[in-house]
Every structure is written in C-alpha cells, then in structure tokens.
Image (spheres, coloured by chain):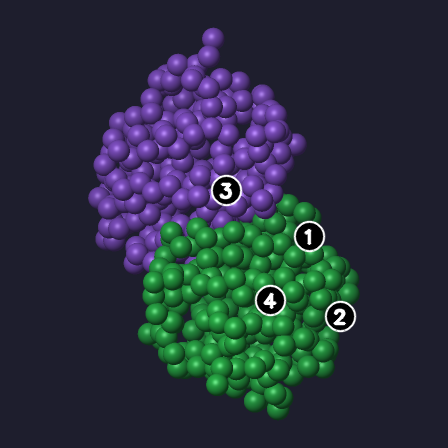
Chain colours: A purple, B green
Amino acid sequence: MNLIDTTITKAVIIFSGGIDSTTLLYHIRAQGYDVTALTFDYGQRHRKEIDCAAKIAARIGVEHKVLDLTILNKVAASTITRQELEIPEGRYNEDIMKLTVVPYRNLIMLSIAAAFAASQWIPELFYGAHSGDHPIYPDCRPEFIEALNRTLAVGEWNPVRLRAPFSHMSKGEIIKLGLKIEVPYELTWTCYKGKEKPCGKCGSCIERLEAFEYANAKDPLDYEK
Amino acid sequence: MNLIDTTITKAVIIFSGGIDSTTLLYHIRAQGYDVTALTFDYGQRHRKEIDCAAKIAARIGVEHKVLDLTILNKVAASTITRQELEIPEGRYNEDIMKLTVVPYRNLIMLSIAAAFAASQWIPELFYGAHSGDHPIYPDCRPEFIEALNRTLAVGEWNPVRLRAPFSHMSKGEIIKLGLKIEVPYELTWTCYKGKEKPCGKCGSCIERLEAFEYANAKDPLDYEK
C-alpha cells in the first residue's frame, strides 16, 4: 500500500508511542522519509507512554524530541492530565470522553509541531488520526485536517503541509498494515494507567484489543490477570 | 463605532499590553463584554511587557491570566525570545522579520487561548490583528483568521469563535478609535527593549510613533534622549 507521495523526504511526526503513530512512523520510514519524531509531555499520569516512544524511536533509528506541554494542565481539566481524577473503566462514551479530552488538544500539538517543522524548513507534518476517533474527537476528522491544512498554508510564508494518511482507516486496518511492515507492537503503550502491565479494562485497552481482533492477530502485550 | 455584535457577553482576549490589544480590550469592554485577558509569557527579553499588561488589566478591572509559553524557545529561534541575539534597529524589513518571528506563533497562542475559552464555555476569542501586520505576519491576515475560524468551528463540539475586529484597520486608525474611548496609552508598552524608557529606534517604536502621528496625537510615553 502506498498512501504517500515520496518526492519530499523530510518530515516531522507527532509520536505518542501508541499503535497509530508508531504504525505511521514505520510506514513513512518505509516510504523513505527522513523523520523527526515529536512527543508531547502534557503531564500524562505516567512516564510509561513517553518511555515507550523513546524506545521505539531508538529501535527504528529516528531523531526523537520530547516537548513540554504541561501548560495544558493550566488551560483545562482532563483525566488524562490530572492526577486527582479517577480514570473511567469500560468502553468510551460521550460522558467519559468529556472528562478525558482537553479542548483543541490536537490543534495545539499540531500548531507547535508545525512551528518546529517550519523553523527547520521541514515541509511535511504527519499525524496518526484515524476514523475510529471521529465520533469522539472532532479534531481527528477529515474536515478538521482540511481546515487546518488551509490555516497552515496561509499562516506562514513557507508553510508546512499536514498529512494524515490513516484518517480514513480504522485502528484494526492500521494494525493490519503495521503487521505487514513489522511494527514492534510489543513496544507500544496504550493503557491510560501506568502500571507494569496494561489493565485491559480502560477504554484505550478495550479499543486496542478489539482492533487486534479485527486484524486477526494476537496483541503481543501481556495484560493484567 | 460598533464593530461587534453584543448578544454574547463572555469573551477571552489575547492581551500583550501593547497598543492593539489594549485598544481592543477597552473597545470590547465598552461593548459590554465580560472579558478574561490572557497574556503569554514566551520568554520575552524583559518582564516589562507582562507587567504593563497586568497594570492595564487591573486599571480596567478584568481578570488577567499569564500563561507560560516558553516552549516556543525550544521550538524555534527568535530575537524576541532569545537573549543572545541582537535586536535589530530601524524600520522592519523582511530580513529583520525573519529573525524576530517564530513560525505560526499566533496560531499557537490562538489555539491555546481557544482551549482555555472552550474549557470555560466562553464562546468568543478576540485578538488584535491589524492591517499593518499583513505584509510581515501571514498569521494576521483576514484569510488566516477565516481559515482558523473554520478550523475552530470543526475542531470542537462546542466551538469557540475567533474575532479580529481590527483586521482591516491600521495601527493609526486603532489609536484614533482608542483615544475616543480613553485608552490609557501611557500604560502600554511597545519597545522590544526592556529599559526604563522606550528606545524610539527599534521597528516597534518607529511603527508606534508613526501611528500616533497618523492619529494627529502625541504619544504619552517618554522616549530615550
């Protein structure tokens, strides 16, 4: 599958160390891009996510930068960033998501990543938005990507182009693609909790396990119990 | 002059303590808005700008928040944020501006301000972009404002609306308006240098002095020499 035009070879990717952005990183590396991976530290409950991102970047041999975005804690409450709130268990629903989402979080991360790319004359910025996020995160939808691309195009004399090649794929389809290019899913982290093993019960774990099931594959992670 | 629909009364404003945002603050307060003023600390060379913003907010009696945006220093070099670079003197030109602008800086500040507004259910976000900035700052142009507004509209279920009522006015016209509503320009700060008195020589000072001249008014600030 060739989702990407490879005439330009330098790119920045927003890289969380989860399934989607790790698969995208491997995908664009396979397409020949010279990649810088950016991970945002927005005061996650645990460092595990960031440590996983660092390990994966080292494994594939790309430059990895961690940028402090703890300002988000001062901007809006969120279960993802605030230690004092309980993490909901079970499948995602709208009420739960209201607790776990900082408004415009992707917009903020993409804006900063675009600034980083522009300042280094890197013309392309990738992120792993996928179709499963659309009902929950408005800023993962194709209309958001298109609008932000227009904003980036008119917002800088040497603009950065935003690419989200997985925006029409489900997480299961992303894993199918990733297994073909040997993405090391054993290094990726999805669980909202930062324990030794993933819990298998939070919305993120459930979504991940269902996606592996869709891909007819076994998740290499060892879950609690 | 009534540039603003006043059916909605809560608003956030990006507020630097300079001419444009101070005039806009006074303007929207005069229109009846209940305003929260946001100032970004992006590692300015001096605290003077932020201190001026705080004084003005206290004078007019609006809530004032300072948000840390020193992450910009790690993202891109800029004479505004980096102590080690020389501040250019004289009129702005393209080469000088390349040194003083962080790419997508307004986009980053507006995104964070929109997140703040959305998290507090405040539906409107104001910023003081004006027509004099268009040739230099692409992210002050009407096409940028329009594109970002579209992005904000599709990027959140309860979107924030971006308003830039001065985007077709020059700085001189802004000062004319401000003098009518008694904006305390003696409290505003424009100079890139953080000395006791403004230098009168940097691009910002020159632009300010010319704008007062256009408005047939005397700048109340006391300049060096």
* Occupied quadrant, residue B17: bottom right
Alpha carbons under labels 4 and 2: distance apart: 20 Å
Q: What mark, if any, has residue A70 been given in the picture?
A: 3
Q: Residue at x 48, y 64 (%)?
A: B46
Instruction: Identify the chain of the residue marked 4, using the numbered disc in the image.
Output: B
Q: Residue at x 43, y 54 (%)?
A: B72
Secondary element type, mark 2 = helix
Residue shown at the point (37%, 75%) measured from the top left = B88
Q: To which chain does the residue with label 1 belong? A: B
The residue wearing badge 4 is B52
The tag on residue B30 is 2
Query: SS of the residue at dot 4?
Result: helix
- Sooner in the amino-acid sequence: mark 2 or mark 1: 2
**Circle 3 crowding by C-alpha within 10 Å: few under 14, some 14–19, many from 20:** some
Could you tell me residue B161's position as x and y percent?
Answer: 63, 58
Q: Position of residue B1 (x, y in %)?
A: 72, 79
